[in-house]
């Protein structure tokens, strides 16, 4: 084996096919898309060089700014909520349910494997206001509260999206974080308990610092997933009411494929890529600093 | 010597492989589509919306009936593409010079205009004239097509839908009201229905367009039949007071609760169901809904109980009483694939599509009905008579908008009638997209 990896020709021979496929399906389209940001036009009448026009449009487009603001707000809130819920569930599995947690873990994980459209239809029915009240509004009526038009205003539609996505994904983060928690040596927990740490103090001073690497991985997973949210929004609110729940991904899709502005659509895609990159780098830097401190 | 011989043999073998490959490729490339008229044509390929089976069914019926000759020359081949991704597919095919023989002209008129600019479409108006089939296109259909496509005829009207207000005759009689002729009548009728506990209008606010259609019609009646063309030409703006007033008039209907609660949550099927189960007194819709009205399973109020009036006039308005119309899913023909087979099909479609569609699916088309159309329901017949007597039509609100302005208009319509967006802001948003 050592002689194979020591042979430069063998290494090139083994790496080339994979590198070629990766370049063709990943790098070429990315670079191609980057190139489109300097062009305008479409496949029918061809493309013409537009210089920095697409970037100027991005700076002055109120719809793009609204979509960016929604994306950032949605990603931050959802990341906090779904990772927090996942972490609480994982603590429940490890410290309360212990060996009996497998059934609960399976049940909570179940929504992860459901198709997004099915989940969205379910939540549309749950929060329905017209032509008939859904279960949520019926429940509110039982307590004497008036029905709410959940999808009629941007604020309530935002929170229905957050609730749906949390329900759909917390099982995944719970399992991910559970894997991190079970890795904490029992002896450390035991010695902490002997020193008098229990409950919230044990979690705060022992469990959280020891599970920080997996917690940060969850945050990176979550923020990148939520920044790129698409299908849930399209299926549940279709970006409405108006365009108040339209994230950058949906705006990019509409611009490129519905409005036929491929150049400007690619510019929005570039903005989204930069956003993901900056956020991920920020989290990596923060985590490195924290680990050193610990 | 031996070495040289081996090299020559290798070279010969290599060249042979390249030559064989070239031959195989040229065999795959097929014949030139612009072959002579006597030569066997390529297939007549129809790329259909997946969701629309009416046109493909009619074409299949024609292929085995009146268009059998054309079909023997160029066999009908149907493929489908979901409507949501249809425009992208057409753009892609046009970019590759691989458009099918006949296809829906996109989800908005701008796609066909773009194709026409690149000289990809057959001038069907000129071709039909050369074939002696010009009279087979109804004047109302021709008027609608020319308004939609900058005065040009490069699509075929597989539907001709007129739009207006359908009303429940029994509910009107029970409440002592008559079909509205003016906007004042309409609001008075709505007030009486509301007072009687009947929802005045059924409307699909989820998709938005049934609401914006009301705004468009109001503009045509109040400002004039060329009001939205003036906006497209940059001679007027949607933010001008007369245009904002139209949006305000429709917003007022919403403010009074005439569309029921949360119209933004009501989809097309629910709105149709509200009207056909007698829960709503009026319903603005196109004549394509006749298929639902004539279906006893869906229509619980009875087809005889449904009346139709054009959009009412507006007091002091400059507009006439033209019917709002559209040509449903207009079909375009690819210039590159246009050969003798396609020509035979075009001739046959012009002569026979109208009767075949009316007989097969009850669809009123923009083609003259030549021959047996079977038994036509009374409601369909009365609408068809209105269409036949119309020579001029008006378009819908977004007909001349670009796709972005269309999306803005339709996604904000529910906010307008729910009072969450002012009429001035609604029009400003659309005007911003129009530039």
Image: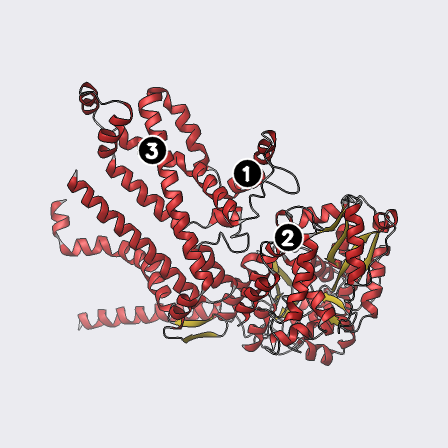
Q: Is residue B186 above or below residue A127?
A: below
Residues at discs 3 and 2 both on one chain? no
Q: Which dot, 1 or 2, sits closer to the camera?
A: 2
The chain carrying label 2 is B
Q: CA distance from mark 1 to mark 2?
A: 20 Å
Element type where label 3 sits in the image:
helix
Q: Please rate how many residues cluster around mark 2, counting C-alpha atoms within 10 Å: few if below 14, some from 14 to 19, many from 20.
A: many
CB contact under 8 Å: marks 3 and 2: no
Closer to the camera, B431 or A37?
A: B431
Which callout, 1 or 3, points at the residue further toward the start of the chain?
3
Find residue B205 and name its label.
2
Q: Quadrant of residue A32?
A: bottom left
Residue drawn where x is 41% and y is 66% of the image: A58
Closer to the camera, A80 or B187?
A: B187
List the residue tagged with mark 3: A87
Q: Which dot, 1 or 3, sits closer to the camera?
A: 3
Image location of residue B238, percent across then percent down: 61, 70
Q: Is residue B98 left or right of residue B159?
A: left
Residues at discs 1 and 3 both on one chain? yes
The chain carrying label 1 is A
Element type where label 2 sits in the image:
loop
Element type where label 1 sits in the image:
helix
Image location of residue A284, percent across then percent down: 24, 48
CB contact under 8 Å: marks 1 and 3: no
Residue drawn where x is 72% and y is 81% of the image: B130
Number of numbered discs overlaid on the protein picture: 3
Image location of residue A268, percent across then percent down: 40, 62
Find residue A122 and name its label.
1
The chain carrying label 3 is A
Closer to the camera, B95 or A243?
A: A243
Residue drawn where x is 20% and y is 73% of the image: B4
Q: Please rate how many residues cluster around mark 3, counting C-alpha atoms within 10 Å: few if below 14, some from 14 to 19, many from 20.
A: many
């Amino acid at each position: 084996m050592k002689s194979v990896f020591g042979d430069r020709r063998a290494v090139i021979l083994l790496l080339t096919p994979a590198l070629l496929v990766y370049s063709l399906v990943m790098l070429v389209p990315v670079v191609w898309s980057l190139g489109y940001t300097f062009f305008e036009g479409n496949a029918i009448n061809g493309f013409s060089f537009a210089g920095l026009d697409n970037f100027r449009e991005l700076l002055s487009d109120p719809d793009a700014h609204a979509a960016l603001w929604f994306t950032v707000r949605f990603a931050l809130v959802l990341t906090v909520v779904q990772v927090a819920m996942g972490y609480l569930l994982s603590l429940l599995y490890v410290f309360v349910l212990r060996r009996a947690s497998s059934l609960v873990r399976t049940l909570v994980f179940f929504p992860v494997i459901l198709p997004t459209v099915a989940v969205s239809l379910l939540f549309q029915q749950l929060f329905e206001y017209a032509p008939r009240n859904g279960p949520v509004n019926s429940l509110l009526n039982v307590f004497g509260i008036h029905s709410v038009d959940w999808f009629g205003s941007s604020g309530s539609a935002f929170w229905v999206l957050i609730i749906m996505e949390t329900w759909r994904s917390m099982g995944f983060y719970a399992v991910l974080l559970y894997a991190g928690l079970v890795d904490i040596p029992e002896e450390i927990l035991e010695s902490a308990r002997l020193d008098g740490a229990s409950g919230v103090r044990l979690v705060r001073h022992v469990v959280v610092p020891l599970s920080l690497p997996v917690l940060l991985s969850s945050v990176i997973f979550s923020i990148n997933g939520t920044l790129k949210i698409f299908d849930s929004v399209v299926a549940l609110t279709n970006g409405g009411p108006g365009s108040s729940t339209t994230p950058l991904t949906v705006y990019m899709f509409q611009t490129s494929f519905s409005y036929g502005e491929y150049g400007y659509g690619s510019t929005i895609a570039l903005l989204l890529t930069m956003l993901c990159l900056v956020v991920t780098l920020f989290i990596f830097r923060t985590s490195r600093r924290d680990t050193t401190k610990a | 010597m031996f070495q040289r011989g081996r090299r020559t043999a290798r070279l010969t073998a290599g060249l042979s492989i390249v030559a064989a490959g070239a031959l195989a490729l040229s065999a795959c490339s097929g014949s030139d589509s612009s072959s002579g008229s006597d030569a066997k044509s390529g297939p007549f390929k129809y790329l259909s919306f997946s969701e629309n089976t009416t046109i493909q069914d009619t074409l299949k019926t024609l292929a085995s009936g009146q268009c059998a000759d054309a079909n023997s020359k160029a066999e009908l081949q149907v493929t489908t593409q979901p409507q949501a991704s249809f425009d992208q597919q057409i753009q892609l095919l046009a970019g590759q010079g691989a458009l099918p023989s006949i296809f829906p002209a996109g989800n908005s008129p701008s796609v066909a205009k773009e194709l026409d600019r690149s000289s990809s479409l057959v001038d069907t108006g000129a071709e039909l004239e050369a074939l002696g089939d010009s009279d087979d296109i109804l004047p109302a259909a021709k008027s609608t097509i020319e308004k939609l496509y900058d005065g040009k005829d490069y699509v075929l009207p597989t539907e001709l839908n007129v739009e207006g207000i359908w009303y429940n005759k029994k509910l009107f009689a029970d409440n002592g009201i008559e079909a509205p002729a003016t906007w004042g009548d309409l609001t008075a009728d709505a007030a009486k229905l509301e007072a009687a506990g009947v929802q005045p209008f059924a409307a699909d606010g989820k998709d938005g367009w049934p609401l914006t259609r009301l705004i468009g019609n109001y503009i045509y009646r109040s400002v004039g039949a060329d009001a939205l063309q003036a906006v497209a030409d940059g001679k007027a703006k949607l933010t001008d007071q007369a245009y904002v007033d139209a949006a305000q008039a429709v917003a007022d209907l919403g403010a009074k609760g005439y569309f029921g609660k949360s119209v933004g949550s009501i989809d097309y099927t629910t709105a149709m169901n509200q009207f056909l189960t007698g829960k709503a007194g009026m319903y603005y819709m196109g004549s394509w809904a006749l298929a639902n009205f004539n279906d006893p399973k869906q229509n619980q109020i009875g087809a005889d109980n449904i009346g139709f009036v054009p959009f009412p006039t507006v007091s002091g308005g400059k507009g006439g009483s033209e019917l709002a119309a559209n040509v449903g899913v207009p079909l375009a023909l690819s210039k590159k694939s246009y050969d003798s087979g396609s020509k035979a099909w075009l001739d046959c479609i012009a002569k026979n599509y109208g009767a075949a569609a009316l007989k097969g699916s009850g669809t009123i088309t923009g083609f003259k009905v030549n021959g047996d159309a079977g038994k036509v329901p009374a409601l369909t017949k009365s609408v068809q008579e209105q269409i036949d007597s119309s020579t001029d039509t008006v378009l819908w609100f977004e007909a001349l908008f670009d796709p972005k302005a269309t999306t803005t208009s339709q996604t904000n319509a529910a906010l307008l009638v729910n009072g969450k967006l002012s009429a001035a802001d609604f029009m400003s948003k659309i005007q911003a997209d129009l530039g």
